[in-house]
Amino acid sequence: MAKAEINLPNGTKITVDGTSDEIIKIQQAFSKNSESKPRKNYIYRNEGIPKKKPSKIGPLGRIRVLIGENYFKKKRTLDDVKKSLEEKAMFYKHSDIAPSLIRLVKKGELRRLKEGGKWIYVNP
């Protein structure tokens, strides 16, 4: 009886006790399996499914939609904007809406005025 240790490419070690012919057959069987490619008829989960692009519309994009609808013709507060977005089933915190409004003011898409201790947003 011969004894052999077979090391596979994935790090697995196999110890075989048998005749030299048996060891050669086992070694050939494992070398064929380790070199084989994945079956062609096997369907990967994501294969053929187009990847969905992440949505780039957050609070900033949603407020831009309001600007396009001339929502800011009248003076609006942060609370007014939040309520308007909630009516359209878009729920954001004040801390998410405020920076977006400020960015739009800096870009010149909105104007900001202070009335009665509160900031008011209108079209420029």
Image (cartoon, rainbow, N blue to C red):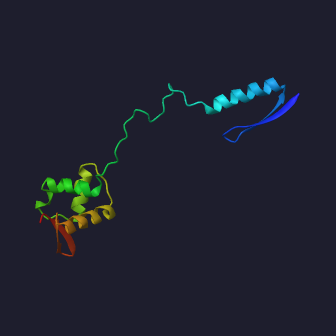
In x, y percent, where is residue 83? 24, 57
Of the pair 96 and 108, the residue shown nearer to us: 108
Count of numbered labels shown in the rendering:
0
- In the picture, measured across the screen, residue 8 lies left or right of residue 78, that is right
Q: Which residue is at 21% across, 72% downward?
A: 118
Q: Which residue is at 10% across, 60% downward?
A: 73
Q: Which residue is at 27% across, 63% downward?
A: 100
- In the picture, measured across the screen, residue 81 lies left or right of residue 122, that is right
Please tell me whether residue 51 is drawn above or below residue 17 in the rendered image: below
In the rendered image, which quarter contains the N terminus?
Answer: top right
- In the picture, measured across the screen, residue 111 lies left or right of residue 3, that is left
In x, y percent, where is residue 122? 14, 65
Please tell me whether residue 89 is drawn above or below residue 106 in the rendered image: above
In x, y percent, where is residue 43? 48, 29
Instruction: Specify the farthest residue to the right.
Output: 1
In the rendered image, which quarter contains the C terminus?
Answer: bottom left
Question: Residue 72 occupies which quadrant of the picture?
Answer: bottom left
Instruction: Specify the farthest residue to the bottom.
Output: 117
Question: Residue 24 occupies which quadrant of the picture?
Answer: top right
Of the pair 69 and 47, the residue shown nearer to us: 47
Q: Which residue is at 34% across, 45% downward?
A: 53
In x, y percent, where is residue 45? 47, 34
Please tell me whether residue 64 is drawn above or below residue 48 in the rendered image: below
